[in-house]
Amino acid sequence: MKIFDTFQTLSEALAQERSGNKTIGFVPTMGALHDGHLSLIGNAAKLSDIVLCSIFVNPTQFNDPEDLKKYPRNVERDIALLEKNNCSMVLLPGEKDVYPDGFEMRTFDFDGLDKVMEGASRPGHFQGVANVVYRFFDAIEPDYAFFGEKDFQQLRIIETMVIRHALPVKIVRCPIVREQHGLAMSSRNERLTAEERQLAGNIYKALLKAKSLWNEDRDIKTINTAVKEIIAETPGMSLDYFRIAKEEDLLPVVRKEAGVKCRAFIAVFLGNVRLIDNLPLYD
Ligand code: AMP
């Protein structure tokens, strides 16, 4: 596995691989890797000849400086994990490489996709995400890029960016990887105590409840109440938002419509950690 710390040295190595007609699969991450990330790496290895993983804790997507400071970092462990898991190249760029002096942040128009849910709770978050991903795509020119459905709103925003800017990359959606009791894997889980981590299984329990009520054709109000109850009954947990929304435009659903794919989305606080999750309401 080759490790690069600048776009320049990476680009030279990629040019060589491309001249041998190799396809590049790109997995952008912020590190503190877990099995969710490794599933993206596994998918990339199936579809592409070269698997490139980046680790960069992107400051422009954090609206809360405390959250950025507390974000878990463990690069040595990450590198060892990647080495064992079919990764061919790792990019660990410095901040000045990603955002060189004079870099101008773009303002992307996502028709409101970036304003709801995570966008409403974390103003500016998705503009930061889109800028960093655009910068990486531009410098790396991957054939495929792999994103987890764990961050479904982010995935829709990246898909929209790729279409609108006609970027020559295929986005591959990867399913959510969960712990045994249902908690979606996340780097932020590292900040939970053992007890909180156990309690966090209730987030998935709430989503499953929403799905079963949805399938019984219960109204949105009943579903909202049931979800709120499960969260309120969990010690230390409070709800930021719960919403059933259409996958396409992420707008809230008023009632079921034939052929419209819907998903339940949730964000909670557990202690001082904010966790998000979602579940498709179809099989
Ligand atoms: P992050 O390092 O949190 O920015 O995540 C990097 C990529 O891994 C994103 O595309 C995430 O959606 C994806 N990811 C994170 N957690 C999971 C998970 N539990 N299952 C699947 N993908 C995930």
Image (cartoon, helix red, strand yellow):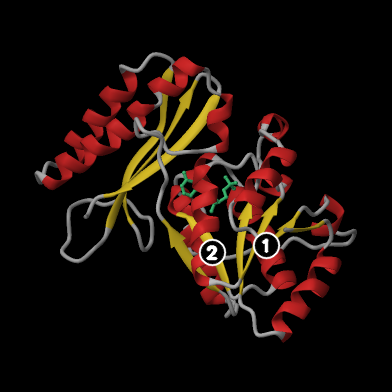
Three-letter code, disc 1: Ser
Residue 158 visible in the picture? no
Front-most of residues 97 and 225 = 97
When the figure is inspected, residue 41 is found, relative to residue 167, above or below; the finding is above
When the figure is inspected, residue 192 is found, relative to residue 59, above or below; the finding is above
Residue 239: image location, x then y, percent: 40, 28
Front-most of residues 124 and 1 = 1
Mark 2 and mark 1 in contact? Answer it, CB < 8 Å.
no
Q: How many labels, in total?
A: 2
Asked which secondary structure carries label 1, the reply is loop
Three-letter code, disc 2: Ala
Residue 137 visible in the picture? yes
Residue 180: image location, x then y, percent: 36, 33
Residue 185: image location, x then y, percent: 47, 38
* Viewport quadrant of the C terminus: bottom left
When the figure is inspected, residue 163 is found, relative to residue 72, above or below; the finding is below
When the figure is inspected, residue 4 is found, relative to residue 8, above or below; the finding is above
Q: Residue at x 69, y 58 (%)?
A: 132
- Image side of residue 126 versus residue 214, left or right: right
Per the image, the residue denoted by label 2 is: 44
* Viewport quadrant of the N terminus: bottom right
User: Disc 2 versus disc 1: distance between alpha carbons?
Assistant: 11 Å
Per the image, the residue denoted by label 1 is: 88
Mark 1: C-beta under 8 Å from nearest atom of ligand 1: no
Front-most of residues 268 and 79 = 79
Residue, far left:
216
The 10 Å Cα crowd at callout 2, few under 14, some 14 to 19, many 20 or more, is: many
Q: Residue at x 39, y 20 (%)?
A: 199
Q: Residue at x 33, y 43 (%)?
A: 243
- Image side of residue 230 versus residue 8, left or right: left
**Which quarter of the picture shows residue 191?**
top right
Residue 214: image location, x then y, percent: 17, 45
